[in-house]
Amino acid sequence: MKKRFNPKTSQKIAFTILLLSALVTIIPVVVIIIVVIKNGISAISWEFLTSMPKNGMRAGGIFPAIVGTFYLTIGATIFSLPLGVLAAIYLSEYAKENRFTRILNLGIVNLAGVPSIVYGLFGLSLFVIYMKLGVSILSGCLTLAIMELPSIITATKTALNSVPKQFREVSLSLGATKWQTIRYAVLPYALPGIITGTVLSNARKTGETAPILFTVAAFYLPRLPSSVFDQTMALPYHLYVISTQIPGIEKNITYGTALVLIIFTLSLNLVGIIIRTRLRKQKKW
Amino acid sequence: MNDIIVENLNLWYDKFHALENVSMKINDKKITAIIGPSGCGKSTLLRVFNRMNDLIETVRMEGKIIIDDENILSPETDLVALRKKVGMVFQRPNPFPLSVYKNITFGLEIHGINSEDSFDNIVENSLKSVLLWDDLKDKLKKSALELSLEQQQRLCIARLVAVKPEILLMDEPCSALDPVSTARIEELMIELKKNYSIVIVTHNMQQAARVSDFTAFMYLGELIEYNDTNNIFTRPEKKQTEDYLTGRYG
């Protein structure tokens, strides 16, 4: 007779391996957060958060970088959210399955795979140079917006598809037009998914350096931007600059900046999750 | 007069001939039941009356269906007006995840209100017409999903009644309900036929016998026999009808 493991033992082994794999995946996150907090927390003060950098960025605060990142995040969303949601509605509710739609979908999938540095160069050539917007917040926002379009479109399409088919049927059977059906019987129920998708892609975009490198980010600009045509400092680029270009900088300033960036991203995620739970509570099915 | 006159109706899903040469006249302010085994085309026929089959891209129809002197199969048919006039109750109760009140006003907001009636009045009258008002008058803000299945199905009928249809299509409206709820929905249907023409598709032959005035028996896409419910159940003319009614297939 063929010898085989006791099923209970093999079950235990399997569970242990599965559990370990799950643990291993969160180790990097935990370690990063611990290291960043340990090294950076001493730099965090009210002054660090609200004052201009001084002494060639070796002292003072990171206020303009925080403000810049805030502007870029909001600004990019202003362009990408409406465009992405409307495109997704067209693709999932109106478009017929044909060659044209397949090409569109393929394009969106590929857009998601383009390296972020290529978006940066694209933004530089189209917005900064060709459209003469200059190295500015506007150019940076537009570049980031294009970059996050695929994830917003995908999130919106998934959210629309997860709305039960019967909602559409009922609405149409009550004499609603297709657009009324989308507007009143589909979109409200897809909204939590759309918002979550948007905020999550926001969080990812907040940390991007490459797309803003040539389009908006200022190396050192110890004042707040005065308009959308102004340059601005931004957290990820500032972090890159002080980690690589400024010799003799205190370690806790670098880690402090990283900590602020992480907190910024995490709080964005948190906001998204809170909005989603609120909306989910109202609209459950 | 809200008769439905069907003349030589043929319907295909792609190459599948789902309805073959169906002709019948459905009478105003009566309940007409369509019975037959699964896949015989009874739901398809029902969904022709409000053109819900149009949602399926491969569907193709020939023939005529006259409602209010208009051929609703003509390409110029205003689907919005047609579906307002010919409402539908679905197999599973499908209220929106909104309050009882909002469910009923859904249709009103879509069509805009064209009478002096206030939303409150319409909600009250619609709920009264499905005998839910006494149970729910203090719970209008409650989510419709917290109601029992029977109440949900009544609410769906109330939602329909609020847009003032003339014909009600019911696609196995009791198949998700227990026998007691089923009996109560059947009572409601008899109540409703004073004001509406009702067409009901059902798997349940007893239900057809209990509630309907006329019964149509369909088999493999064809209308085999259509007559007074009494005649169908006591003296069926066709052998196929008799076989089905006596449980030899189906």
Image: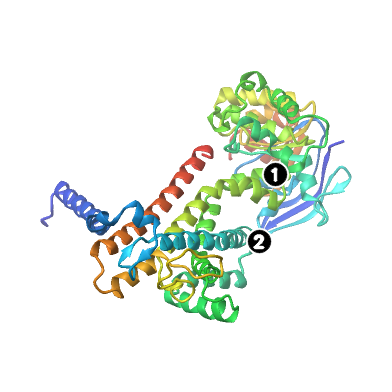
Q: Residues within 10 Å of mark 1 (few under 14, many from 20)?
A: many
Three-letter code, disc 1:
Ser
Could you say where residue A52 lies in the image, as x and y percent from the top left? 39, 62
- Nearest to the eye among marks 1 and 2: give it: 1
- At x 62%, y 57%, the residue is A93
Could you say where residue B170 lies in the image, as x and y percent from the top left? 68, 37
Could you say where residue A129 lies in the image, as x and y percent from the top left? 56, 81
Three-letter code, disc 2:
Asp
Q: Which one is nearer the viewer's eye here, A169 or A72?
A: A72
Question: How far is mark 1 from mark 2, CA to CA?
Answer: 23 Å
Q: In this rendering, would A68 be left or right of A103?
A: left
Determine which quarter of the picture holds residue B94: top right
Q: Residue furthest top?
A: B134
- At x 41%, y 59%, the residue is A63
Res. B238 in view: no
Could you say where residue B156 lies in the image, as x and y percent from the top left? 65, 34
Question: Circle 2 sits in a helix, a strand or a loop, which is it?
Answer: loop
Q: Where's the N terminus of chain B, which quadrant?
A: top right
Q: Is residue A203 above or below residue B171?
A: below
User: Circle 1 marks a residue in which chain?
Assistant: A
Q: Where's the C terminus of chain B, which quadrant?
A: top right
Q: In this rendering, would A45 be left or right of B244?
A: left
User: Circle 2 marks a residue in which chain?
Assistant: B
Residue that numbered label 1 is attached to? A173
Q: Residue furthest front?
A: A55
- At x 73%, y 32%, the residue is B161
Residue that numbered label 2 is attached to? B14
Q: Residues within 10 Å of mark 2 (few under 14, many from 20)?
A: few
Circles 1 and 2, Cβ within 8 Å, touching? The answer is no
